[in-house]
Amino acid sequence: MNGPKLDLLGQRNPAHYGQRTLPEIEGLLTERARSQDVRLAFFQADDEGRLVHWIANEAPSVDGWLVNAGRLTHTSHALRDALGSAGKPFVELHLSNVYSRETFRRTSVLADLAVGVIAGFKENSYLLALDALIAHLAS
């Protein structure tokens, strides 16, 4: 699940977010998932309500989530409630190292619900998060 402005990856601040587009990252994830016999569904929205609605609709059919909530990470109690209510494990991820940037980025309203947080590895954050979630679900 990808939050606001993540559809602009590859164009927006490549020093922080990397050169790859969201469809390219989804391709990398699909390849990795296929090699581990895992099926993925992708969703990106700039609107908090659409993300909350998607979580509620998808929760019965998923085992876990990869969550890059973008700026909503720092503010969205609605997203927090939706993920908490879904009752499925999730890994919070960030392309940039949020702890080396502005102070407000260091606060996450999601992190304490997540099984883990991965940050700072650009597109590899997604791959590391996928591997971590698969390992978590297998244990």
Image (cartoon, rainbow, N blue to C red):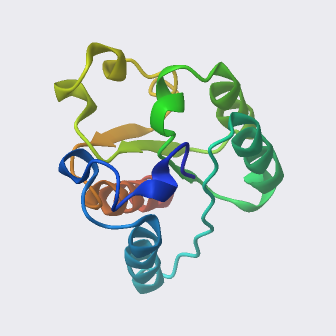
- Can residue 63 be seen at all in this image of the molecule? yes
Instruction: Name the residue nearer the viewer: 106 or 138.
Output: 106
Reply above or below: 77 against 22. above
Q: Which quadrant, please, contains the C terminus?
A: bottom left
- What percent of the width, then of the height, locates residue 35? 40, 85
Reply above or below: 39 against 73. below
Reply above or below: 16 against 10. above
Lateral position of residue 58 relative to residue 70, left or right: right
Lateral position of residue 83 relative to residue 112, left or right: right
Number of numbered discs overlaid on the protein picture: 0
Lateral position of residue 55 relative to residue 80, left or right: right
- What percent of the width, then of the height, locates residue 135? 39, 59
- What percent of the width, then of the height, locates residue 81? 70, 26
* Residue 46 occupies quadrant: top right
**Picture residue at 76% right of the left edge, 61% below the top:** 61
- What percent of the width, then of the height, locates residue 79? 65, 31
**Picture residue at 50% right of the left edge, 57% below the top:** 7
Residue furthest to the front? 11
Instruction: Name the residue nearer the viewer: 120 or 112.
Output: 120
Lateral position of residue 14 relative to residue 127, left or right: left
**Picture residue at 36% right of the left edge, 58% below the top:** 126
**Picture residue at 21% right of the left edge, 51% below the top:** 121
* Residue 134 occupies quadrant: bottom left
